[in-house]
Structures are given as C-alpha cells and as structure tokens.
Image: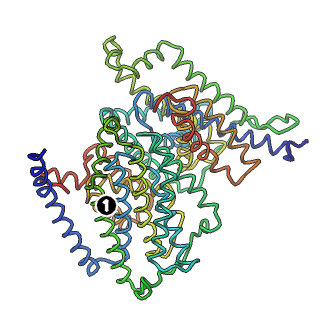
Amino acid sequence: MQQIAPMEASVRTERSRSEIVAFMLMAVALIVAPAVIYPLFLMKALCFALFACAFNLLIGYVGLLSFGHALFFGWASYISAHAAKVWGFPPELAVLTATAGAAALGFVAGAIAIRRQGIYFAMVTLALAQMMYFFAVQAPFTGGEDGIQSVPRGKLFGFLNLADQMTMYTFVAIVFLLCFLLIYRIIHSPFGEVLKAIRENEPRAISLGYKTDRYKLAAFVLSAALTGVAGGTKALVFQLASLTDVNWPMSGEVVLMTLLGGLGTVFGPVVGAFIIIAMQNYLAAFGQWVLVIQGVIFVTCVMLFRRGIVGEIASLLRIKL
Amino acid sequence: MFEIFGIPSQALFGQLLIGLINGSFYALLSLGLAVIFGMLNIINFSHGAQYMLGAFAAYFLLQVAGLNYWVALVVAPIAVGFTGVVIERLFLQWLYKLDHLYGLLLTFGLALIIEGVFRNYFGSSGLPYRVPDALQGGQNLGFMFLPNYRAWVIVFSVVVCFATWFLIERTRLGANLRAATENPTLVRAFGINVPRMITLTYGFGVGLAALAGVMAAPIYNVSPQMGSDLIIIVFAVVVIGGMGSIMGAILTGFGLGVIEGLTKVFFPEASNTVIFVIMAIVLLIRPSGLFGRGT
C-alpha cells in the first residue's frame, strides 16, 4: 500500500494539470468575454452551462440518464421568481430558496426514480417531470401560460444593484465558477469515487458494502440542487419564469448539450451549452429547423462521436478535460 | 336519463368511452414499445413521431392519391413500418452492443427530426380527417350516444392487440422470436436469421404505432405534435405495466385509459396527472411494475 500511494498521487497531479490550465483559460475567457459578446447572451449560456454540468454529474459520473431535469430547472425558476417578486426576497436569498426547493423536489423524485434502473430510470424521470409540468400549467401562482413576468432583479447583499447588466453578469459568472468548482470537488472526492464505482459495476459496489441507493439518491439531490441554482439565476437574468423551462423539450436540450460536449467530461457540458445556445441564437430565424438540427446533432453524436467534442479532444491530446 | 353518484349518466359514460378510446391508443403504443424492447433492448423514443407519421400518411393518401380510410389502414402501417426497417438498418443495428441509453438518445434525435420537419411545413395547428362514410353516425344506447367510429376503434384495437399477443405467444414465429430474445446465439445456430428477425420486429412495432396513428386521425386532428404529448404518457403506462409481458401492456393500457376517463368525471383537475401519480405509487409499492419480472 505504501508503495502505491505516492505513485497514485503523482498520477493525479499529472492528470489534473490540464484541467487546471483549462479552468484558468475558462476563467480568463469569462472576464474578457463581456467586452466582445452581448452580456445577456453570456448570462443565458452560463446558466445553461451550469444546468448541463449539474446534469452531467448524474449521467457522466453515476451513469443515470435523467430525462426530467426540466422539472428542477423550471420549478427553481418559478420559486426564485415568486420569492423575488411576491415575497420581496433579495436576489441571493431568492436563488438559495430556489436551490432548496429544487433539492426537496430532487429528493422526492429521486427516491421514486432510483427504484428502477437504466432505461426505466429515464422514463420515470420524464414522466415525473411531465406530471409537474401539468401541475405548473394549473397551479395559480405560476401564472399559467403567462408565467411570472417582470421579476425584480433586486440589490445583491442590499447594495449591489443587479439591474446594471455588468453587475448581473459578474454575479452570474461568479455563481457559475463557484458551482463548477463545487462539482469538480464532488467528482474528485471519495464520495465521487464511489459514484464512479456504481457507474462501472453496481453489483460489485454493493458487494463491497456500499449502500448504492443512498449514494444514487445523494447524487440525484445534489444534481437537482445545482440545477436549481441555474434555474433560479436564470429567472433573475431574464426577469421571467415560464412554462418553457419546465416542459420536456428543456430536458431534451440539456441532454443534447451534455452529449455534444462530452458525457463524463468536466468541461464538456460547458462547451456543449455554449454551442447549443449560440446555435439557437443565430439560427432563430430558421424556425422549426432548429429542432431538426438538434435532432441531427443527436443522431450524429450517437453514431459518430459518442465521446463528444471535449471527450474527443481529450483523447486526441491524451489529456484529461 | 339517470344519475350515478350525482353524475348524469351521459357524462359518466361519455368520459368512460373517451377513456376506452385513449386506452386503445395507450395499449397499441405500449404494445409496440414492448415488442421492440423485448427484441432490440431499445426504448423507441420516436414511437410518438411514428404514430404521427401514420396519421399523416392517412391524410396524404386521402388528399393526394384519393385513397380512403380503409386503404390507409393497410398501406400506412406498411409504409411507415418500412421506414422503420430503414432506420434499423441505417442506425439501430450499430448500437446493440452499446449501453441501452444510446438507443434512447438516437431515437429521441430521430423524433426531433421528424417532428421538426412536419412542424416546419404544417405548423402546429391540426388538419381535419373525415370519419369514413361507412362509420358515420352512431347508436343511441338509451343511457348514452355511441358514435360508430369510436366503437370501431375500440373493437378493432382489441382485435389487433389480441392478434399480436397470439402471434407472439402462440405461433411458431413467435416462439422463435421469444427464443431469440433469450439467447440469440443459440437460435442462430439453429439456422434462423436473427438479425433479419430483429429488423422486421422493429418494422412491425413501428407499423403498430402507425396503425394507431391512422385510427386516431378521424378522432383527434392530424398535427405534428400529436405524438410527443402522447408518448410520455405511454412511457408511464409502460413503467406501470412492466415491459416483460405482452398481455400486461395491453391490460395496463386499457385500464389506465378508463381510470383517466373516470378521473375526468370525478376530479377533473387531476385528469392530466393521474397516470403519473399511479406510476409513482406503483414504483413505491411494486418497483418492477404490475406485470414486470425483475428490472
């Protein structure tokens, strides 16, 4: 054991060097970007990037495909919008309330969904999300088709006025980077190693004495909570919470972002989210063809490069990203 | 006219009828999903889109070629089933050795493509399709009015469901199919062309979806998103029933349709969600589904 331990340590530093460099590049890019790109677009992309990272925590590291993550994203944006508008919460508290709400929803949905594996898990999460979508359509406080409009962005910690676009951007970028680091930390913790063990061989993980259901549920709640941060922030950015965010195409979109960027890669979901959001932005004039293009990307990814963009680059350069 | 639990019989039986109609479509679609899953180990996410294709095929046959409902009932499933065969040969056959999830993702992508193309040309409003002449009108049963076409849909889907069950559970072809599901290598050693059987199974499952689409055309409008709303409910039906059993899929489909119809009478607010709630309850009590074997 003593012989192996230092070797492992050196492997780990070697591997993570590329990740540290990539993280630095990403942070620099986020500082430079608003000078070149419209901040509102960047904020949207960052919210979706966080959403995709949170989703990737489940599919990439536990091997659970949730087809119902719109449930947490959409409901978190409703909760955040309601808290900020009706209860008059400051923005940081609104996002935290949304996170707690999404975690609670994640606990209930997760407890039901982890009772089935594989393909059934995907169908159960999709069905639960659709149920909560219908609930959102009917519930009085979601505003039905109108959604919750003109949500005040408020003053962060009481003195930073988020109505200013650059202040809002800084807030979103910091929230994103913190959550990204948290996800990175989770993946590389002993807890994360157990999750990967479950992904690779669940019966073996059980035979080693791990209560895999608890680990899966914990991962599900974490993923839902982080999705909640993304959804809650998005409601403040756009000052709107609507049915779009809670409906099933949103669940499909986050799957697409993660698949395109690379399942189980740290940076893949971020890259995927930026590409898909940019595509929706610039191809909006083509109407329904966006849907077709998304379908084509799905098919191409599954048939030709299942590792996704970042996964392919990483294997080409033989580094870890 | 009489009342049951304070509900006029017209309303009660009317919703029961709608429930049975919906149940027919749930049964036909979950049956197709179960057949495909049994053989290919793939959840066919494009099932809803292929159901929609069936309805559009009937619409085109009538509008462009002037061929009536009865021709469409035969031609549309075969044509759409053939596109299924092409999809299986082009895409799905390369995915069998991979994680099941890739089949789900691929068929989801295909569903987006099909739905996107149709939405682009036909928007999201529905196109009307006339009830065939022979089935116009209806019967007054005294306690309710029964339109002929709706009676036909229920009877015909029951017949199709049981014919499929008979084909798979009681014929030699079905026996080969079930054997190939258990152990494809051994069945191939007996000289049976298993890959071709898999291809045709997918085509058959897709054809069933298209058949349901043709039957649905005169009841609901023909519209590009008619399938995507339905498929999620059918997924819940499949989770409740478990996909291990053909008969289970049929019974669950009809049963849940009726329960949904009754919910519309007694507690209309929950009619959209009742199937999902039942799914959650079933998962908590009997995780493998009502008719399922293992996971």
Say which residue label 1 marks: A183
**Is the N terminus of chain B in the top left, top right, bottom left or bottom right quadrant?**
top right
Please identify the quarter of the rendering in which residue B28 is found: top right
Query: Residue at image x 25%, y 78%?
Result: A31
On the image, the x and y values in percent for residue A11 come to: 11, 52
Q: Can residue A313 be seen in the rendering of this structure?
A: yes
Host chain of mark 1: A
**In the displayed structure, would residue B29 be above or below residue B171?**
below
On the image, the x and y values in percent for residue B34 come to: 50, 31
Q: Nearer the viewer, residue A278 or A118?
A: A118
- Toward the front, the furthest residue is A2
Query: Residue at image x 27%, y 57%?
Result: A268
**In the displayed structure, would residue A131 be above or below residue B79?**
below
Mark 1, Cα crowd under 10 Å, few <14 / some 14-19 / many 20+, is many
On the image, the x and y values in percent for residue A269 come to: 31, 58
Q: Nearer the viewer, residue B282 or A289?
A: B282
Position of B267 with respect to A304 (left or right) is right
Q: Can residue A289 be seen in the rendering of this structure?
A: no
Position of A102 with respect to A134 (left or right) is left
- Toward the right, the furthest residue is B1
Q: Nearer the viewer, residue A229 or B48?
A: A229
Q: Secondary structure at mark 1?
A: helix
On the image, the x and y values in percent for residue A116 come to: 46, 39
Disc 1 residue type? Ile
**In the displayed structure, would residue B112 be above or below residue B85?**
below
